[in-house]
Image (cartoon, helix red, strand yellow):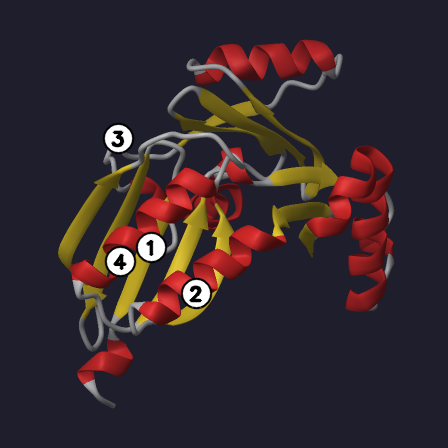
Amino acid sequence: MSPLSRSRVLISLEPAAVHAVQLAGAVRRRATARHFAAVEPHGGKPWEAAANALQANLGAWKLQGAATVVLSSAFVRYAVVPHAENLSEEAERHALARAHFERIHGERAQGWQVRIAGCVGIAVDAELVESLRASVSGAGLRLASIQPYLMSAFNRARGRVPERGAWIALAEAERVCVALLDGTRWVGVSVLRESLPRLAVEREQARMAATRELAVLELPLSPDPYAMALSAE
C-alpha cells in the first residue's frame, strides 16, 4: 500500500472559515499539517462564500489522499422522518425522507440532495455537493464522503451517550444544533441562533414540552478550532 493511499484529508466547511487537516500514517494516523482560510461573506446562497474559499485555497495547500468534508449545521437541514425506521428498503426510506422535506419546505426542496440516517433526514443543496466535488477533484484529491457535523460529532462521541439517551448540544459560532435522543430513538433536531449550548437546550426543552429528565451532552469535546474537521477522524 502506497503512502498516498494511506493518507486522509479532513475538511470542514463553516460560515466564517474553512479548515483542513492532513492525516498520514500506516497504523495510527497523525496530523502532519493544518490549514485555515477565512471566509469573506458576500451575497448569494449561505454556503457559497465558504465553498469559494475552499476552491481558492485547496490546491495551494498541497494535500494528498481521500478527503472527507464535514458541513456546518448552517448548511444542512434536518428533520426527523416519522415511521422511517419501520421501512426495511433503503429506497423507500429515502423516498419518505424526500417527501417529508418537500412537505415542509415546498418546491425548493427539489434542489436538495436528501439522505437518511436512522430516522433523521438530512438535506443539502445539490449545488453545494457539486461544488465540493469539483473543488476536491480539482485539487487532486478523492472525495470519500460529505458528512453533516451532527453525525460525525455524534459518531465520535457515541461512547459518552447514556443508554437512556441525551440532549445533544453541538455548538458552533453563533449557532447550536440541538438533538434529542430518547434511548435509541431520535425525537427532534433543531439548529438555533444561540451562543450558549445550555440555553439552546432549555429553549428546545420548553418548545417540545419535554418532561423526561435526560443528560445534556455538549459537543465538541475540545475547543480546538479544527474540532469540526477532526470530528471525522
Mark 1–mark 2 contact, CB under 8 Å?
yes
> Is residue 46 rendered to the left or right of residue 117?
left
- Residue marked by disc 3: 223
Q: Measure the alpha-carbon separation of dots 2 and 4.
A: 11 Å
Kindly state the secondary structure of the residue where label 2 is placed: helix
- Of badges 4 and 3, nearer the viewer stands 4
User: At which x and y percent is residue 60?
Assistant: 18, 60
Residue type of the residue flagged with mark 1:
Gln
Query: As displayed, is residue 72 above or below residue 28?
Result: above
Q: Which mark is residue 134?
A: 2
- Residue marked by disc 4: 58
User: At which x and y percent is residue 172?
Assistant: 40, 28
Nearer-N-terminus badge (1/2): 1
Mark 1–mark 4 contact, CB under 8 Å?
yes
Instruction: Indicate the quadrant where residue 22 lies.
Output: bottom left
Q: Quadrant of the N terminus?
A: bottom left
Kindly state the secondary structure of the residue where label 4 is placed: helix
Q: Quadrant of the C terminus?
A: bottom left
Nearer-N-terminus badge (3/2): 2
Q: Is residue 230 visible?
A: no
